[in-house]
Structure formats: C-alpha cells, structure tokens
Image: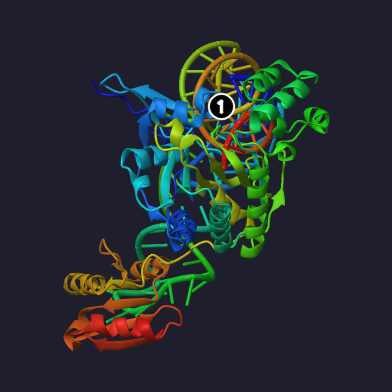
Amino acid sequence: MTAAVPPGGFSAPKGVPEYVGPEFTSVRDTLVREADRAGYAHIELPVFEDTALYARGVGESTDVVSKEMYSFDDRGGRSVTLRPEGTAGVVRSVIEHGLDRGGLPVKLRYTGPFFRYERPQAGRFRQLQQVGVEAIGVDDPALDAEVLAVADAGFRALGLRRYRLEITSLGDATTRPQYRQELTRFLEKLDLDEATRERARINPLRVLDDKRPEVREQLTDAPLMIDHLSDSAAAHHAAVKRHLDDLGVSYVENPWMVRGLDYYTKTTFEFVHDGLGSQSGIGGGGRYDGLMAELGGQDLSGVGFGLGVDRALLACRVEEAGLDTASRVEVFGVPLGDAAKDRLVGIIGALRRAGIRADLAYGGRGLKGAMKAADRSGARFALVLGERDLEAGEIQLKDLADGSQQAIALDGAAAAVDRALEDS
RNA sequence: GUGGGUGUAGCUCAGUUGGCAGAGCACUGGGUUGUGAUCCCAGGUGUCGCGGGUUCAAGUCCCGUCACUCACCCCA
C-alpha cells in the first residue's frame, strides 16, 4: 500500500515549530551555558517513558497528566508517554542508576523536546523545547537561590530585560494539609461555575491563579499558603530571599502563584515576560520534597527549573535582543571554469581542515552569480580563481567588506587566508 | 475542550456590485564569458487551503471541512 501525498503537500504536525538557522541553538546554548558554569552535568534522557512515571510523578490531578499527554501502547503492549516535562525522568534516572549514592547534591542539566497535547497558540506548542536543571539530595535554601540565579543569568545573557522573577513558598507536609482544608472551606462559600468548583475539589490551590476578574475579586480575602508556613518552611523561604539579595537577583513575591505540577513544595517560582501575550511564562520551577520517595527512591529533596526555549526566543525577538546572526562561512570560493573549480575544491577542503568555515559556488554559475552567492554567504573573503590566475600561479583574495583585492600565491593559499582572517 | 480572526506566487499582500490571476520583495539569467551589496532589462511559478452548492460565469456568494492565528483554559 502506498500512502497518498495529502492535498497541498505534507506539513509538520500541528503545533510543532521548526527552526532554521543559528537563532534557536544560540538561545538554547546560551541558557545551558549558565548551568554548565555552575557545575551541572549533562544528562541525556529518553524522550518517552513508562506512562505510570508521569501519572505518579507529575500528579494524576494535573491537567498535564489528565488531558495533555501523548500516550500510546507500543508493539509490546506497554503504555508509554512522550515526556511532558523533565523532572520525573531525571529523578527516575537518578534512582535507577544510584546517582544519589555518591556525593550530594547530584547536579544535572538537560535540554530537548517535550510534548503536550494542547491547542496551539502564540508561545504554546505541542512540541516545546526546554532547558532544565535539577539539584537533588540537599535541602539547602542556598541551592534554591543558585538554581534561580542560573536561570536569571541565562535570560540576562540573552539580553532580556522585560521579565520579572516571581517567587513564593508552597510550604511543606507539616502544614499544607491544614491550609488546604482552610482554603477549601473558603472556596466553598464562593460563587463559582461548575468547572472551577470541580477544580477546587481536586486541587484547591489551582483556583488561586484564576485570571478572570469576577473570580479574582472573590479571592481577595482568600487564605494564602505564605501565611501558613511551618517555622522551618518560613525560615527556608527567608533564607532563599536573603541569598537572592546576596546574588543580586531581583524578584517579587507572588503569594497567589501556583504550579501546574503537583510535586512542588517550599520554594516555587516563575519567570514572567511582559511582551509575549497570554503565554507569558518563560521559565518556572521549584523545590520538591516528596518526589524521590514517591518514585521509589530515597527520601531526598530536590530543586530545579525548566526554561522555555521557544518562548525565550520569542522574547528575544520582542525585545530585539542580540540574537545570533553569525555568518554561515568565513571564506567563499568563486571558480571561473572547470580547471579552476578542480583546484578550488581542494583549497576549500584544506581551509576546512584548518578549522575555517568555507563554502564555494557550485553548479557552474557565472562570475556575477557566484559573487552574489559569496555576498549572501556572509563570508569575509572571496577566493576568485580563473584561467589567468592558474597560469600565473596565483589566486585573488577579495575582501568583501571593503572591496579590496590582492593576488596571493596558489601554493600555501590556505595558510595565507588563515593569516588574513586573523588580521581582519 | 470553548470562542473570534485569517487562508491568493518562495515571502508580504492587493484583487471593485460575481466578468482574462496581480504588485512589491526574493530568486535565475543578461546588460559587463574577471568581480557582490547600486542601477537597467528579461524570465518563471499559482490545485486562489480542500470538497460541495448557486450561476452563462465564483478568488469574490452559500454550506461543509482542514489549516494557521489570537484569546479562554492550561502552562515553559
């Protein structure tokens, strides 16, 4: 059976962005670099996992798990899921390979695609790209602050300014159940629609970040977790803020903030950009006390973040931040005739072996067209070679920035170009 | 999952009360078989998103559908 080409041709799956050119990797690598600088080791993880890992790790009651996962049965009848987030996979790997049996904290960073079945929108994709870190095994507010500082440094390095860091504390197991009850009692008295009531029943905290004005109004006097912290959680929160001040990371407190994933405790945060429309979160994360144990490991605390590379790139465009516009190559070969092309192919190859990015005009184009291609390539120099030069044993090195040109010896041309690039 | 907007050339778009499918940019070639980013000339592309309907005639009107997009929701 041969499948037909659809009318209008094939297209990428709905909600999957594609990036051509240097911009995407530039943004991603800039964000990752700050994690490397703080000693986080790369971990390459599976893109799909046992469905139960996410159901258990992320939380059955979250929208991410209940309606947004790409789950399917493989040919062996196992239910697997394309990863909707990174933390559960990292924690699973740490437990499986006993990474937490050595020195703590285990500091890991990852990057790659994640998948959520959502209706696409500006800054919201079904395949999204994240850079993330996790520091597992030590419950130290200084580590929370480090994670926050790494994310902030990444956005700063991109040249972003129009964002803010919002933080709060979601408390710990000693006082959260009581608070939850108190909040539930409060919400029961409000005038809410059926869907919101249902949400209040499943996870009352989630109602707190409802954006609708008529709901917000009723929430003004809602009890807040930040006012119900245990002594140790309050001390932890105060210490995080102190460390942030020492690190020069500015933040605002947002006690209404809620995370979409159930595992967060204590420090919780979100980076919000004000130029992106309704999908304004460019990064988020926090501490998780129970996740390691929940997934069958030691009862260790962890802290981490996930940064949205797609959204960070959009933010760079909005702010006209310095995106990488690096040229493809440094040198471009322009051959005139077959004999010259034979020789130039070898010279371009020698340049590449010497670590210089180089390309040449293929396809037997005329001089004018080949020069145009050289211009478009962004190369600093063009190497023009024709019959006349071959006879003279020379090649023309043209500086495309100022138009000047000089003849250099064909023998050892690659080395001469190398020197010219260093001088320029 | 819910609601609004938009689908015409590779890109950005114009297309009148229904009457031959267009512009700019980009691309390719030439003017200048040895010089690009300026200028001049030439050239090409269209399932007018897709399917049906009305009509002598549909890019244009009607119905359906798909896609994109923005917002709700949710979240990075």
From this view, report whether residue B25 is shown above or below residue A304.
below
Model colouring: rainbow
Taking depth in this image into account, of B55 and A268 the one nearest to the observer is A268
Q: Which residue is mark 1?
A: A63
Taking depth in this image into account, of A138 and A159 the one nearest to the observer is A138
Asked which quadrant contains residue A145, the reply is bottom right
Q: Secondary structure at mark 1?
A: helix
Asked which quadrant contains residue A344, the reply is bottom left
Is residue A247 at all visible to an observer of this figure?
Answer: yes
User: How many residues crowd around disc 1 within 10 Å: few (fewer than 14), some, or many (20 or more)?
Assistant: few
Is residue A272 at all visible to an observer of this figure?
Answer: no
Image coordinates for residue A401, horizontal then vertical, percent: 45, 79
Image coordinates for residue A122, horizontal then vertical, percent: 59, 40
User: What chain does badge 1 belong to?
Assistant: A
From this view, report whether residue A148 is shown above or below residue B36.
above
Asked which quadrant contains residue A268, the reply is top right
Classify residue A186 as left or right of residue A353.
right
Taking depth in this image into account, of A321 and A147 the one nearest to the observer is A147
Q: Residue at x 39, y 36 (%)?
A: A297
Q: Residue at x 29, y 18 (%)?
A: A77
* Amino acid at pointer 1: Asp
Taking depth in this image into account, of A156 and B35 the one nearest to the observer is A156
Q: How many marks?
A: 1
Classify residue A53 as left or right of residue A350.
right
Image coordinates for residue A232, horizontal then vertical, percent: 64, 44
From this view, report whether residue A392 is shown above or below residue A358.
below
Quadrant that contains the N terminus of chain A: top left
Classify residue A193 as left or right of residue A315.
right
